Image (spheres, grey):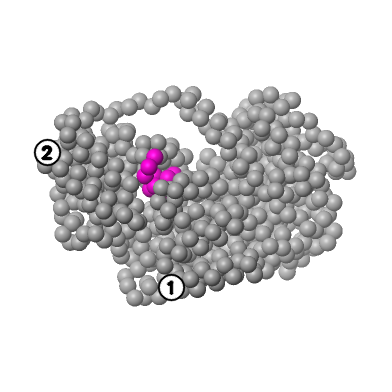
Amino acid sequence: MTAAQHFTPSLPPRFAVERELGRGGMGTVLLARDRTLGRPVAIKVLTPELARALGPERFTREIRLTAQLVHPNIVPLFDSGESDGWLFYVMPFIDGPTLRTRLGGAQPLTVAEVIRIVADTAEALAYAHGMGIVHRDVKPENIFAYGGRALLADFGIATGDGTAPGGNTLTATGTIIGTVSYMSPEQASGERDLDGRADLFSLGCVAYELLSGRPPFEGPSTIAMLAALMSDHVPSVRECRPDADPALATLIERLLAKDRDARPSDAAAVLDALRPLETQSGSQRREAAGPRPVTARVWSDPPEVREAALKARELYWNAMQGGDGSRDKLLMAQVYAEKAVQLAPGSAKALAILADIVHVLMLRGFAAADETMPRVRELRMKALAADDATGEIHISLGAMFLYWEDDFDMAGTELARGVELAPDDAEGHRIYGAWLRIAGRAQEALEHMRAAVRLAPKAPFMYVGQADVLMALGRYDEAIGPLRQALRLLPRYDAALERLEMSCHRAGRHDEALDARRMLLGIRGAGADRIARLTADAAEHGWLVARENDLRRELADLVARAEREDAFEDRHTTRQVADKVLVVLAELGEWSQAMDWVERAYHRRPGRLRRVLNDLPYDHHGLARDPRYARLLRAAGIEELLS
């Protein structure tokens, strides 16, 4: 009899167990095929001792709490259950190494890699702690290196810290859950009032081991390890890793403080300490890579044409996102672009810029679509015929294929060609960055978004594009900076405020999230009564309850609007009413209803499915718990998004 058969005497028939993945003090992890979801999964079966200590009722309540967590840096929970006294929960199978595997490699991790891993894990903890959930078992075995970032797994034994809606500390008195080598002193003592600082201690243990190659607390037995944990002083990590920045060593020392009051106050404080170190290491990597080759062609138009076209492009970049004053700026941009075309009718650059301006005037509702679109197509074709080696026209065509023609592959081809030919075009980098993000190539996308910001530092839209990629990478705390810069440039910028509220919420910065949501409601004309209700709910029940209540009010308004008009029609924007409904449902964790809208969107415009899943500010992986999700992705030929 195999270990898998021994530990799964009667799992539900939907699971076809293949092999054992690992075993620890709290249970066994099995690889299985979920016939309902149509994908491989990892199933953790708790030990009988732990199952008895928790009990089915407590286990179910804790799993229900942690199943709400959806974050790019957290491995989600799909399902849970009980079978003949065995308690189990189901997670996606991550086909990548854990940090334990990485630690066993021949080469030690670089300091830059450690900083990135710790930052990614801190982002995940900031979100979980903000939701009132403490992990309790942060260790190398529970952190995966996947897709260029760290994923924190095994929230199945997490517990509420008393701040989650309806949550409290559920674990039975006297039951110590966790792994001794990474356990905080208060957790090891069996204290019940654990908070996020217990996880920060564990994160410090992980960081120390990633740099030094060994845990900070060791011993020949559990008793010896507990004694070391309670009394031993840990030497500076710089004694074995002199290349570690002193500030990083100091942070790890603070994380490993015996007294939790001496540790950083929360995960956001850890990220504040890490960000300067990460920026420094990132700059060093870019400098080592050297300058990229520039293939831009010399602009051959006369100076007066260049001057008019560049002025048009600057105005266009600063107004294309809409908002106050955008109509006048776009009309001014059109005047300059028309002037450039009049001076040089065969200028491909001028024709491409004019086409984009006229198109956005239509999108923002400042020109009639039936009159505008034929002219936009004519201008783009004229530009292509004038000079097909002009990058701007390929960028313009790429945007058209991506957002309006639903031809994702052609969009990627055109955008890549456009950026190659016009490396100084900020909008080209931004749109190609968006394409890369939708394609699941977020690390590449980030480099293009950074280039867009460097090339157009006064354009708010570029900062939102950068924030979108950071959010897709799970780096919500880092996304806050670009979003605030966008709002400095355009204070009533709806898209920036929407993402700022989401990022602050996921980063555990609830007071800032509340401020952002109040501002967002104000610019959307929600009314003083709704803002007052949000504020009163936050004061009485806390941010999490207040946010959920307000999101449900927003959902009711959107559903009513969807009944009055075509929810799947593009109206003056690429964001449909159906998209807005989907985002709110995802924020509420109503994944079955969200999947209903995804299916409706696919049936209406099949080629738009990638954007519905990857171009809206929500994490589509939450949909994976619905059996329809895998079937739909396979039918659409984009099953790579299952990973």
Determine which of the numbered discs, if any, sits on residue 557 in the image. 1
* Residue nearest the observer in this picture, 18 or 467: 467
Horizontal side of residue 120 vs 301, given as left or right: right
Residue 422, given in percent of the width and then of the height, sits at: 28, 34
Q: Name the N-terminal-most of marks 1 and 2.
A: 2
* Residue nearest the observer in this picture, 336 or 455: 336
Horizontal side of residue 621 vs 91, given as left or right: left
> Magenta span: helix, strand or loop, mainly?
helix
* Residue nearest the observer in this picture, 274 or 567: 274
Dot 2: what SS? helix
Distance of label 1 from label 2 (alpha carbons)? 50 Å
Residue at point 61%, 49% (across, down): 124
Give the vertical position of 111 relative to 257 (above or below): above
Residue at point 60%, 63% (across, down): 543
* Three-letter code for the amino acid on which mark 2 is drawn: Leu
Dot 1: what SS? helix
Residue 480, given in percent of the width and then of the height, sits at: 52, 48
* Three-letter code for the amino acid on which mark 1 is drawn: Asp
Q: Pointer 1: residues within 10 angstroms few (<14), some, or many (20+)?
A: few
Residue 632, given in percent of the width and then of the height, sits at: 42, 60
Horizontal side of residue 606 vs 306, given as left or right: right
Give the labeled residue for mark 2.
343
User: Is residue 110 within the magenta segment?
Assistant: no
Magenta residues, start to end: 457-469
